[in-house]
Amino acid sequence: PGLDVLAKRAGLLYFGTAIDNVVLNNTKYVSIAYNRSEFGQVTPSNGQKWLFTEPSRGVFNFTDGDEIVKASIKAGQMRRCHNFVWHSQLPEWVEKGNFTKKELTSILENHIKHVGKYYYDACYAWDVVNEAFNEDGTYRETVWYKTIGPEYIELAFKFARKYTSKHTRLYYNDYNIETVNNKSTRVAELVKDFKRRNIPIDGVGLQAHYTTGRSPSYEAQMKTIKMFNDLRVEVALTELDVRMPSLPETPEMVAQQATDYANAVKACKDSKDCVGVTVWDFWDPVSWVPYTFPGQGNACLWDEKFNKKPAYYAIADVL
Ligand code: XIL
């Protein structure tokens, strides 16, 4: 059985992966990506981001997103859709447009309206807002924050509720919120505030980009997931990967990577309402890690020769 089969038997909704358009010409990659026994859920790594979906104002393009969405529907997989609002991978017309608050709010609504309606009920979940906070819990100074103010977050969630199917789970998604710290506590405050004021939010996505040997413990992850579940939102590990801090990797790093992956998956499985785990791609050559963190890498479950690593088997063991 593959990881999704095991995950479902263990009570999770899915085990999934991010999929990147750049590698869809690789038949071996594709045969694993759309293998429903390994992955019951997929996330387009890039194709649904603003840069690709609305490259110029009012001009929408679903080509890259559709490529993955359509193939995953055919394969019988679920989708997490990613994302409506982020500070990164924005087209220049948004980033440097010098809009007024009113203009940018209407641009935001129009974007979520078009993309949300287009994928209407194709997404189990949408990452509505991605990475809005700094490590100390203050607001990240993005074009959204600077132009609209902190209320851009709740506006995005309201627009997402209005323009997607009522079944679509609306998530806040971020990294470094897998332990109880200033940032995750701030996200918990946001959830509490939204619940109190009836602003729609259904889930918190813990990206879970980890480094071998420095990953949060099983207990720490359990505690954080509980903190969010106690606020009546579900949790998912949305972008799990565990990179080697330096290359070439040592046998110790490989063993530690397996432990770190297994702890994360086990914490999700053992929590009250952690619905599933998504790895941020499964094949090392398409991982974002070496591009973003030069000198680091080998973060995925399959190596460049498509061999499953010890981490794969460690996950299978805890499921
Ligand atoms: C990454 C993609 O994997 C890369 O291909 C792209 O160049 C940059 O973005 N957090 C997120 C994801 O929420 O959208 C990022 O994806 C990885 C970090």
Image: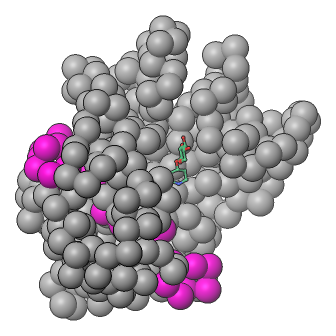
Foreground pick, 306 / 97: 97
Q: Position of residue 257 (x, y in %)?
A: 74, 43
Q: Quadrant of the N terminus?
A: top left
Q: Position of residue 40 (x, y in %)?
A: 34, 32
Whether residue 115 is in magenta: the answer is yes
Q: Position of residue 71 (x, y in %)?
A: 28, 22
Q: Position of residue 128 (x, y in %)?
A: 30, 63
For residue 13, which quarter of the picture? top left
Whether residue 268 is in magenta: the answer is no
Q: Could you tell me which residue is drawn at 37 percent across and 63 percent down?
A: 94
Q: Is residue 274 above or below residue 76?
A: below
**Region of the chain picked out in magenta, as a range:** 114-139
Q: Is residue 273 above or below residue 28?
A: below
Q: Could you tell me which residue is drawn at 88 percent across and 38 percent down?
A: 247
Q: Is residue 237 above or below residue 53?
A: below
Q: Could you tell me which residue is drawn at 61 percent across and 86 percent down?
A: 136
> Is 278 situated left or right of 304 in this image?
left
For residue 48, which quarter of the picture? top left
For residue 57, which quarter of the picture? bottom left
Asked which colour scheme the image uses, the reply is one colour
Can the viewer see residue 35 in this picture?
Answer: yes
> Is 101 situated left or right of 281 in this image?
left
> Is 189 situated left or right of 72 in this image?
right
Foreground pick, 159 / 177: 159
Q: How many marks?
A: 0
Q: Could you tell me which residue is drawn at 80 percent across and 36 percent down?
A: 254
Foreground pick, 226 / 174: 174
Can the viewer see residue 49 in this picture?
Answer: no
> Is 115 situated left or right of 90 in this image?
left
